[in-house]
Amino acid sequence: MYKRILLAYDGSDAGQKALLDCLDLAQWSQSEVFLIAVMPSAMSFVGLEGGVYDMELEEREKKKHQAVLDDGLRRLAQAGYTARGEVLVGEAVDEITRYARKIEANLIVVGHKHLDSWAARWWRGSISGALIEHAPCSVLVVIIQ
């Protein structure tokens, strides 16, 4: 049974669908819900023009990810659920699996949207696919068309 569900939330349509599916599952299994938003590390913002650290850009990204997290927590609260949430900084798969271990999650829930072209799939990669390989527990991938 799933007693601790971790939802990696990015605010996308797929993420919102995952949040709704997560709610149904959490209500059914009477689980604790944890919500995270993963922000790329500051070094991910460095472009081809060089290694200049942009503190303003990082601050904007922090605010953006906090807003995404707050939106998810608000949606959960409107559905009558109290969840704990946190913005994490780093590579998504590493941070999600690390947090899952920390809270001893039984299930990780992520949203996924099929990408149209092979180039988009190659360039973007699949967080959900990599997560399945590295997760310490079951992974539910909620697909949106």
Image (cartoon, rainbow, N blue to C red):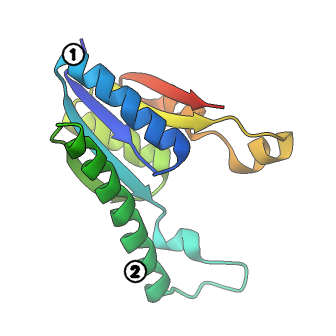
Earlier-in-chain disc, 1 versus 2: 1
Residue 5 percent across, percent down from the top left: 28, 29
Q: Is residue 42 left or right of residue 71?
A: right
Residue 104 percent across, percent down from the top left: 22, 30
Mark 2: secondary structure? helix
Name the amino acid, label 1: Ser
Name the amino acid, label 2: Glu
Total marks shown come to 2
Q: Nearer the viewer, residue 132 or 50?
A: 132
Provide the residue designation for mark 2: 59
Provide the residue designation for mark 1: 29
Residue 56 percent across, percent down from the top left: 45, 87
Q: Residues within 10 Å of mark 1 (few under 14, many from 20)?
A: some
Which image quadrant for residue 51? bottom right
For the point 48% across and 73% down, the residue is 42
For the point 30% across and 29% down, the residue is 23
